[in-house]
Image (tube, coloured by chain):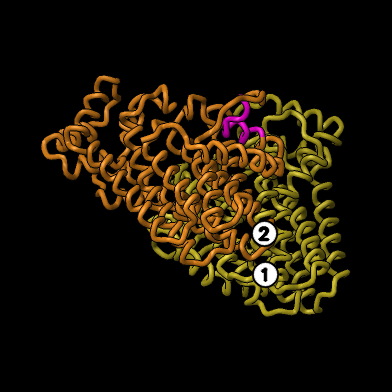
Chain colours: A yellow, B orange
Amino acid sequence: MTTVAPARVRESASVVRPALKRALARLDPTSRAIASYHLGWTDPDGRPQEGGGKAVRPALALLSARAAGATLETGLPGAVAVELVHNFSLLHDDLMDGDLERRHRPTVWALWGGASAILTGDALLVLAQQVLLDLATAEGAAAARLLADATQELVRGQAEDVAFEERPVVGVEQCLTMAAGKTGALLSASASIGAVLAGAPGSLCAALAAFGRELGLAFQLVDDLLGIWGDPAVTGKPVLSDLRTGKKTLPVTWALAHGGAAGTELADWLAAGTARGEEQLRRAADLVERAGGRAWAAAEAARRLAYAEQALLAAPVPADACGDLVALGRFVVGREC
Amino acid sequence: MTTVAPARVRESASVVRPALKRALARLDPTSRAIASYHLGWTDPDGRPQEGGGKAVRPALALLSARAAGATLETGLPGAVAVELVHNFSLLHDDLMDGDLERRHRPTVWALWGGASAILTGDALLVLAQQVLLDLATAEGAAAARLLADATQELVRGQAEDVAFEERPVVGVEQCLTMAAGKTGALLSASASIGAVLAGAPGSLCAALAAFGRELGLAFQLVDDLLGIWGDPAVTGKPVLSDLRTGKKTLPVTWALAHGGAAGTELADWLAAGTARGEEQLRRAADLVERAGGRAWAAAEAARRLAYAEQALLAAPVPADACGDLVALGRFVVGREC
């Protein structure tokens, strides 16, 4: 599997960034400055910096327009909007999770306080709707509706994620439902919003949405694997970060439910809930692995990717757009950060 | 001036509540339960309770439809949407301001933590858009756009409000601009969204928006007066709450800018920033009053109400709807909580 972003992802980042900048220009200077920092474009003092996220969601949105036989540009407002919603959720999540770093840099709330993270997140969420509604077309309104529905799912998933931390037992199915909301919904919207903006038939939009939803689950499974076994130098997250916070991620949930003696030991370890040094965290990671959580999550990610590709291949998508979407999906599952 | 809600406000609350309940039914059970508590419908354990806010914004939205010659029902999705956005902002504001009580009850974050306030607020904001976009009409999309623009203004105003607390000096004009965002924008949208949903001409929508914007400034001025001189038993806020937190409200800002010796004394008192007992707070309130801040704010509220009525009377609004809007405006300015 590839770990270098396919050409389409790099290309789409260069198309989307200027459009995203134009959208941010509508915000007040403070929110704009904080959002620019959060997006990796500036340092805390506002000086230009190289950086930014993987931009998987905007790439999906642009390819989605091409999958419907339209130009990349048709999908551009959708690409901007899904990236804004994604970053709204990161700003709020970092605060709620108490995460001090993202992509090797201090988080917004850690630098400027909780109110800044809340307000900038709110501003980006509303801006996403404005970008689509300003089109003042029926397609723009349909895209805004699709995105609002996905955002509501995303918020539900995040609420479940927070609630799970308090619960001693969470089932694998519950955890997959949570991940479908937290990650699947926005990837599903990303993969179909370009087609919606292109006025494509409902059946094609639905196939693309299914592709995105399955890919989203694969994405979350890989994220959870990287949260335990990822290289902190590459992921930009603290070592073993998800075990440190006791998060009920998918590999952990599977290990607890199906892991035999190792799973029971892991449950005891989680219930003890004491402050954890790195050695202890490594032991817990070994327990998840011995219980089969790592292998299951990797296999499940591959399975979800296969479902995603099946959904795509069953739809009337032009061969080049289809190839690009498949490459993007494989990149998402094979990535190291 | 009247302090009892006009018949139209009471009537609209009874029309809007069932529609608001239907909208909330789309949320996950946790967000729904927290929102029901926040709206005053249930106690912290989910048992039904009597209560709720003034519902000024939904009443404006319903009357706005009638002002355009349509039925109240035409404005109903707008009424629900503006009330949802208002409550989104209250949930986030209470957390950012650290307010422990609202309407004589513990705030959501005080009961369930910051994450619950953030996520429930996010859910209500998105739900507001869903309610309008689900109409799947051009008018619904136009209303969604109007509301998104107003919400962006609201977030900007709130960001300024938070930023002002850190600054030693804030001008009266700056403070009025902040209030126009924080309160004026959503009242403006409330007063015009019904007409937009009714497909009314742009000139009528603009006149209603101007009515709402001026009324919003009057509303904020009265709010600021009540935050200092209101009766805590009636307002549900702690006694002298805005002085306690050192907020740069409009009467305080005016007193600092134009208040002569009393204003200078007030500035010194604010700069000292020590923990304040009630006696000290009463002294500060007297300083604001002696500096002319109270009289100015009351006069400015009356002036803004007059502007609002002028905007309305210049527009082709049917006499009965016009009378109801004027009565609602006078209630807002004459209220005691």
Residue A185 badge: none
Where residue B25 sits, quadrant-wise, is top right
Same-chain status of marks 2 and 1: yes
**In screen coordinates, is B295 left or right of A327?**
left
* Res. A278 in view: no
Q: Which chain is disc 1 placed on?
A: A
Residue A127 coordinates in the image, percent (x, y): 53, 59
The answer to whether residue B73 is above or below residue A205 is above
- The residue lying at 21 percent from left, 28 percent from top is B286
- Camera-nearest residue between B320 and B314: B320
Question: Disc 2 designates what residue?
Answer: A145
Q: Earlier in the sequence, mark 2 or mark 1?
A: 1
- Camera-nearest residue between B107 and A171: B107
- Quadrant of image for the N terminus of chain A: bottom right
- The residue lying at 63 percent from left, 65 percent from top is B138
The local crowd at label 2, few if under 14, some if 14 to 19, many if 20 or more residues have their Cα within 10 Å, is many
Residue A284 coordinates in the image, percent (x, y): 72, 35
Which span of residues is magenta-colored?
B33-43
The local crowd at label 1, few if under 14, some if 14 to 19, many if 20 or more residues have their Cα within 10 Å, is many
Work out how far the residue at label 2 is from the one at label 1, CA to CA, in angstroms: 10 Å
Three-letter code for the amino acid on which mark 1 is drawn:
Glu
Question: Disc 1 designates what residue?
Answer: A139
